[in-house]
Image: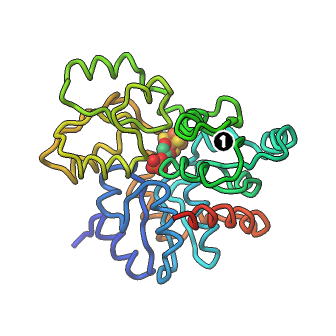
Amino acid sequence: MKMSIVEKILKLKKEKKAVILAHNYQRPEIQDIADYVGDSIELSRKAAEEKDAKIIVFSAVDFMAESAAILNPDKKVLLPTLGARCPMAQMLTVYEIKKWKAAYPLAPVVLYVNTLAEAKAYCDICCTSANAVEVVESLDSETVLFGPDSNLAEYVRRKTGKNIIPIPEKGFCPTHLLFQPEDAQILKRKNPDAVLMVHPECTAEMQEIADFIGSTSQMCRYARESNEKRFIVATEEGLIYRLRKENPEKEFIPAYEEAVCPNMKVNTLEKIYTALKEEENVVRVPEQIAKRAREALKRMFELK
Ligand code: 13P
Ligand code: SF4
């Protein structure tokens, strides 16, 4: 009898001692077969904890798979689609970091994990949207260089009161920029009982009208634990699938249905199958870069 693509992946996964980690924005059918679905900090942690697996298939974008490779130099980390690149991660070059460090030699550099490995090698500590405030608060400096997301930088500035200098000045996520406060206000007026959840990669104007701001998994936790029944969700549309699956009795309204990250969506079951079968698209980070980037990631994990 002919096996389905899901059966083929699961069989191969067992034979090769592989685990599949999928970000919250992955297609529903990928979330359904993954061993673990989460936000970027949870997935990095999972990758760091993977002791028994020989292969990690990281269904997400480049920087997340790179972090897994940095944390697991002894394992094969596969990215199902080589071209799955986060445009925001590409916005911060090493040249730019050096330029800002020269201008503010005493300021620590905090980099969002949405950066390339070579950028991470030049920072003091990494952060994700789930822990950026705690990371910056842990630093013994009032001035902090923070990149590449200027919206997350602004969120951190408001929460900590510190002098947060965004590097580059206007780094952004093209998908989260699609959320407009005017549209969200209309939805709020139509659904006065709904709670507006906003990702900190959205603009400051969106953050201002939010009832809750958090990472993708923090939104999942909030929706699960809250007594509220209806939620307007301002982040990439893939999260809606997980929210509905985990909370069938609650209602989730996308703040903008077209907010799709094309880079996250290039991964498919077929590509996962081929990558695993051929053991192709291995993510490699040169050890001299990985060593320094690993330190920055580990400092973040040590915080909590
Ligand atoms: P999370 O860590 O909240 O999942 O965010 C990752 C990301 O790329 C958001 O665009
Ligand atoms: Fe990058 Fe934005 Fe896509 Fe997240 S949603 S991977 S930040 S482009």
Q: Describe residue 80's horizontal placement relative to residue 223 as left or right.
A: right
Residue 182, how many percent across, how many down?
37, 16
Going 49% across and 75% down the picture, which residue do you hit? 49
Going 50% across and 27% down the picture, which residue do you hit? 204
Going 21% across and 73% down the picture, which residue do you hit? 1
Residue most extreme to the right:
102
Residue 248, how many percent across, how many down?
15, 49
Asked if one can make out residue 263 in the rendered structure from this viewpoint, the answer is no
Q: Describe residue 209's horizontal placement relative to residue 133 as left or right.
A: left
Question: Quadrant location of residue 77?
Answer: bottom right
Q: Is residue 168 above or below residue 48?
A: above
Q: Is residue 92 above or below residue 281?
A: above
The residue indicated by pointer 1 is 147
Which of 202 and 30 lies nearest the eye of the viewer?
202
Going 70% across and 35% down the picture, which residue do you hit? 165
Q: Is residue 239 above or below residue 73?
A: above
Asked if one can make out residue 12 in the rendered structure from this viewpoint, the answer is yes
Which of 193 and 3 lies nearest the eye of the viewer?
193
Q: Specify few, some or many for label 1: CA neighbours under 10 Å numbering under 14, 14-19, or 20 or more.
A: many
Question: Quadrant location of residue 283?
Answer: bottom right
Q: Is residue 156 above or below residue 72?
A: above
Amino acid type indicated by mark 1 = Gly
Which of 177 and 283 lies nearest the eye of the viewer?
177
